[in-house]
Each structure stands twice: as structure tokens, then as C-alpha cells.
Amino acid sequence: MSRRPIPADCLQPAPAEELAVRSADGTRLHVEVHGRPGAPTVVLAHGWTCTTHFWAPVIHRLADRYRVVAYDQRGHGRSELPSSRARYSTRALAEDLAAVLTRVVPEGERAVLVGHSMGGMTIMAGAARPEVAERTAAAVLISTGPSDLVAEVRIVPDAVRPAGLRRFLHRQVLRSRLPLGPVGPVSRAGLKYAIMGTRAPAERTEVAVRMAHACPTGVRADWARVLDRLDVRPGLGRLTAPTAVVVGAEDRLTPPVHAHRMVAALADPQGLLLLPGVGHMAPLERPAEVAAEIDRMATAHLPARRTTADSADPAVTAVTADSAVTTGSDLPAAVTADPERTAVA
């Protein structure tokens, strides 16, 4: 299998601390803490088939100013597999988030919550839980949706009719238990079409492809079953913290229609950032702009616990999207920022 160059900012930095957090049902969650111990806290929740490594480009850009916490969703990365199918649910997602926040955000303090795809659904699912609500200063929902996911997926072309046939085909693809097989030209091309934008560089596509291939087949299928019937609109309505929404204009899995619906339903919307040429993996494709949006929300809604500007680590801040290294194993079983951006209030 050929190895492609991996951008330097996509290599996961060594965490300052690693934690094992038990959720309500006993499932052990792997949690990593990066950045400054005394700085305001940002908590990152990744999406379906990803791991904490998904957030590496964002962590590199935030760790000099924030205490950045990332955790593996149950069944993903280094978190435990649930003991039964029944433990794959939106309730479990909410309980996992509550457990992580209770451990990493002291009572009386708050954090900015950031969720990509299923991570955004996690925030919506847990919004009404006291452990979550009381620790949320603001939220950023990225490439996500609250319901009707299969109905809005845009992988199968609209030319395939009727709409019911498209939904059937999407359901079969997303819930498939077939292994993805080795990483190769066909799988790269197929996954790039499904999850990346037309402007995504090959190196960043490689990161996403390796990560998806590393996700256990059963985990991928069992979470797809949950996403198939997901409806977290009640939680979205109870998300009272200031919330920003980010989406790629070419997102086929959670198209911009979801972003517009979320903004309309939010109690305190803080704008919609629409990224032209970007697909579903916005934090990988345009990490500078995603990190800037998180920073904007944190600056506005988090009190500074300690000034860190004078002690910024140049080894962290020097990593950019333009740097790249060739690696064969530096990216654990995984996976040019365009300055153009469109902000829709």
C-alpha cells in the first residue's frame, strides 16, 4: 500500500494528560487534554468513524491559548466497545458527554463545546442534561444535523428517482457491514466523493480515508443504525448557550439545509459560517477557519482564567496547513487553507 504525504498539522500532538472516564453504563472513554492547564477550556467531540486524531489540525491551532480536551466516542479509537447493541444510542452519546464534562470541567466553570457530525448530534442530545448545560459557555456545531439525515444525504445523485429509491440506497450504503478493504485508489476516490470537497488536497483526503478504514466495521454499522433514525431536535431546542454553526457548501452527508434549520431553531444563534468548496470534513479541510470560529466563540463567551499569550509554545504555533511530512506509521491507523469564506448571519 502506497503512503502519501500527511500534512504536519494532521499529526496528533502528544497530550499533556490522558484520562479514562467511565460513562453512566460503565463504558470507558479515552480522553486527551492538550494545551495550557490554566487556560479556558474547549471540548471537542468527533464524528462517526473518526477518533481524537481528527482534531489534530484544530488542536495545533488552539493549544497555545486554550486547554483543549478531546475524547473518543464509544467504540471509536481507544474508547471501549459497548457491551451490547443497545448501548449505541443518542442517550449514550449524551451520557458520555456528561461524564467527560463532569471530569474535565470543575463545578462552577464552563467550556466551549465543539462537535463535528455525530459530535454535534452529541451536543444536541445532551443539551438539556444539567451536567452539560451548567458547563456550557457556548457551542460550535460543525457539519451536522438534528434529524432526517438519510432523507437529506446527497451521495446518490438526484437524477436517481424516485426519492424513495435514493433513500433506500443511502440506507444500504451507510448501514453496510461490509469491510472497507485496504486503502487504495478506488476507496480513496469513493470516500473523497462522499466526505470531502472538490478542493480538498490529496494529503488531507488520505487522513480521512485512513481514519474511516480504521473504524471497526461493526461499530460503523451500529452507529449508522442510530443515525438512520436520529432525531435530536428536542435537544436542539433546549440548547440555550450561544451557538455558532459551520458547514461546507459541498457537504454531501449533512448538507447546508441542516445548518439553516439549526440556526432557525437555536435559542441564541451566533451565525452560520458557510465554507465554499468544502465537504463534510471541514476541520480537516479548512482547519484555520474552523479554529478561528472556535476562538471567536471562546473569546466572546469564556472568561480568561489565565493569560497565556506571553508563554505561547512556538513549536505548536509554527505548525501550519502548508507544512507536510511523509509518514508510513506516524498517523495511527487513521487518517491549503483557502482564505475565501462566507459568513451568513
Image: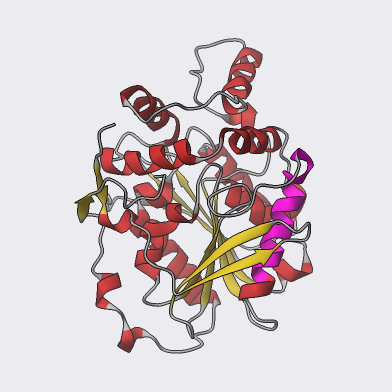
Q: How many marks?
A: 0
Q: For residue 99: magenta?
A: yes
Please tell me which residue is depicted at 72% across the width and 68% down the height of the picture.
Answer: 133
Quadrant of the image containing the N terminus: top left
The picture places residue 333, in percent across and down from the top left corner, at 41, 45
Of 95 and 179, the residue lying toward us? 179
The picture places residue 80, in percent across and down from the top left corner, at 64, 52
Vertical arrangement, residue 86 with respect to residue 21, above or below: above
Please tell me which residue is depicted at 51% across the width and 19% down the height of the picture.
Answer: 156
Quarter-of-image position of residue 153:
top right
The picture places residue 293, in percent across and down from the top left corner, at 44, 62
Q: What stretch is highlighted in magenta?
A: 85-101
Query: What secondary structure is the magenta-colored segment mainly?
Result: helix
Residue sitting farthest toward the top: 161
Horizontal relation, residue 95 to residue 206: left or right: right
Residue 266 seen from this side: no
Q: For residue 331: magenta?
A: no
Quarter-of-image position of residue 290:
bottom left
The picture places residue 25, in percent across and down from the top left corner, at 78, 56
